[in-house]
């Protein structure tokens, strides 16, 4: 990346100084690492800790969302931390996804979500949670660098 920037600056200074002949003025090239496919997906770790006041252990915890075409993805239980965890790879990036955490099949609020939104499709409405402001689903801002 630095070589690419240096090459561009050198090229730009040559064209400003009037030495813009075909033998010296070349467009900056991108490094080989940047020539490949741009990264468009990312990995997200979903965690749902069992609330301290909850004594009964849930049987299943799952996540459903636009990144899984609203199919259930199970979370695994980590006994020492009392947390349910799932790592999802290749989530499409540069997109806002909608999702819900299901605890024993019932939609549950995720404290780590990026925000809430009103359901916009039948799939979202199926998994919505009730809030004081009406039905909502969680948001995940999927940014890639």
Image (tube, grey):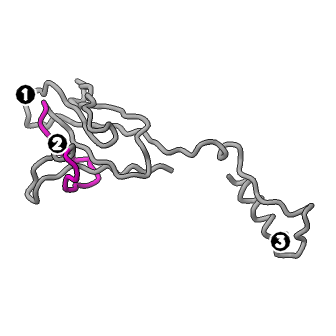
Describe the element under mark 3 as helix, strand or loop.
helix
**In the picture provided, is 55 more to the left or to the right than 80?**
left
Predominant secondary structure, magenta span: loop
Coordinates of residue 108 in the picture (x, y in percent)? 15, 41
Mark closer to the observer (2, 1):
2
Describe the element under mark 2 as helix, strand or loop.
helix
Q: Residue at x 19, y 46 (%)?
A: 122
Instruction: Residue 102: name its quadrant.
Output: top left
Q: CB atoms at circles 3 and 1 under 8 Å apart?
A: no
**In the picture provided, is 71 more to the left or to the right than 56?**
right
Mark nearer the N terminus (2 vs 1):
1
- Structural crowding at the residue carrying mark 3, measured as other residues with C-alpha within 10 Å and reported as few (<14), some (14–19) or many (≥20): some
Mark nearer the N terminus (3 vs 1):
3
Q: Residue at x 39, y 51 (%)?
A: 95
Instruction: Give the residue pinned by disc 3.
Output: 15
Instruction: Residue 55: name its quadrant.
Output: top left
Q: Is residue 27 above or below residue 49?
A: below
Coordinates of residue 18 in the picture (x, y in percent)? 88, 75
Magenta region includes residue 108: yes
Coordinates of residue 23 in the picture (x, y in percent)? 92, 61
Give the numbered dot on residue 56: 1
Instruction: Residue 64: name its quadrant.
Output: top left
**In the picture provided, is 11 more to the left or to the right than 34?**
right
Q: Is residue 52 above or below residue 60?
A: below
Instruction: Give the residue pinned by disc 2.
Output: 127
Magenta region includes residue 90: no
Mark closer to the observer (3, 2):
2
Q: CB atoms at circles 3 and 2 under 8 Å apart?
A: no
In whole angstroms, how far apart are the C-alphas of marks 3 and 1? 72 Å
The residue stretch that appears in magenta: 104-122
């Amino acid at each position: 990346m630095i070589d690419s920037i240096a090459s561009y600056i050198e090229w730009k200074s040559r064209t400003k100084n009037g030495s813009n002949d075909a033998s010296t003025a070349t467009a900056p090239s991108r490094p080989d690492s940047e020539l490949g496919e741009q990264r468009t997906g990312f990995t997200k770790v979903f965690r749902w800790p069992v609330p301290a006041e909850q004594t009964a252990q849930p049987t299943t915890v799952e996540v459903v969302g636009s990144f899984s075409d609203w199919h259930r993805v199970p979370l695994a239980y980590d006994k020492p931390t009392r947390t349910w965890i799932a790592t999802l790879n290749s989530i499409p990036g540069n997109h806002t996804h909608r999702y819900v955490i299901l605890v024993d099949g019932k939609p549950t609020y995720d404290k780590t979500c990026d925000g809430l939104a009103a359901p916009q499709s039948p799939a979202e409405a199926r998994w919505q949670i009730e809030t004081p402001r009406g039905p909502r689903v969680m948001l995940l801002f999927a940014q890639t660098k």
